[in-house]
Image (cartoon, helix red, strand yellow):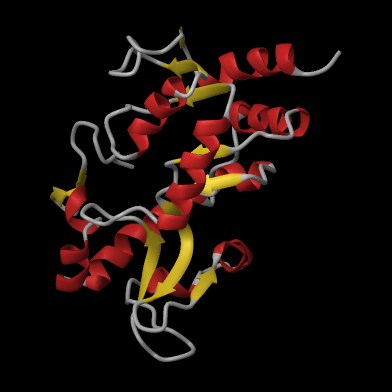
Amino acid sequence: MSTFRGAGGLWEGSPVQEVAHPEGFARDPDRVWRFYNARRLNLLKCDPNPAHHALVRLERCRPRFSLITQNVDGLHRRAGSRKVIELHGNIWLNVCMQCASVEHVEARWRASVRPPEESGTSPHCGACGALLRPGVVWFGEHLPADALKEADRAVRSCDVMLVIGTSSVVYPAAALAQVASECGAFVIEINLERTPLSAAADAVLIGKAGEILPELVKRAEPA
C-alpha cells in the first residue's frame, strides 16, 4: 500500500492527502471509507515486529516509561504496550460526527469473515444515526488536546528519549524531541537514515528498529 509521503502515494489515481482531509471526507465520504477499510484489511495481515515487542519489555522494566506514537495502526497495543499516547488517533476507531460516540471495531473485524464496513458505504452511528468517520487525525486538523498535553508532560520529565523511525518533519510531534532535549533529556535517534533531528540528537543509530531496539533494551533490562 502506498505511503503518505512516499513516491507514487496515490489512492484511486489521486494524492493520498485527498482521502485524509476533512474536505475530502465532506465531498465523498464513501471514497474515504474505501481507503480506510482497505488499510484495515491490510492491517489484519500484520503483526507487531521485534521493535514493538522490545518497547513492551522496556515499559516493564522502566515504571516511568511512556510511548508516544504517530502511528494509527494499533500495533503497539496489540504487542502489549499499555502506556500509549496516540497523537494521530487510531484507525480502528469509528467516531460519530454528531454525538461524538466512539466505537472500537478491531475485534469485530478480526472475528468476521466479511467485516460490516467492507462494503465501501459509509457507516452510521447506532446511537443517533449520524455519519461516522475514522478516528484518525487528518491533514488540516489539530492533534487531540489531551494526547498532546500528556505527551508534552512526558517529554519534559524524561531522562532519555528514543525517537524511532520518524521523519521528524511532521509538527507539532516533531518538536517533542527538542523539548525533551531542552529539559535535559538524552535524545537517541534510531532511523534508517539521518533526519532533521540528527544534528541535535545526542546519539544517532542508523539501521532497522527491529534489530537495534531489542539489543538496546537488553542493556537496559535488569540482570
Look at 24% across and 32% down and name the residue there: 6
Q: How many marks?
A: 0
Look at 70% across and 33% down and name the residue there: 59
Report x, y in % for residue 194. 33, 12
Report x, y in % for residue 37. 39, 61
Q: Residue furthest right?
A: 223
Q: Is residue 80 left or right of residue 97?
A: right
Q: Is residue 129 left or right of residue 16?
A: right
Task: Indicate whether 87 appears above or below 30.
Answer: above
Nearest the viewer among 75 and 178 is 178
Look at 39% across and 90% down and name the residue there: 129
Q: Quadrant of residue 22?
A: bottom left
Q: Is residue 70 left or right of residue 80?
A: left
Quadrant, the N terminus: top left
Report x, y in % for residue 96. 40, 77
Q: Quadrant of residue 131?
A: bottom left
Nearest the viewer among 123 and 185 is 185
Quadrant, the C terminus: top right
Report x, y in % for residue 130. 35, 86
Nearest the viewer among 87 and 42 is 87
Look at 29% across and 55% down and name the residue there: 142
Task: Indicate whether 63 appears above or below 78.
Answer: above
Q: Residue furthest bottom?
A: 128
Task: Indicate whether 14 appears above or below 24.
Answer: above
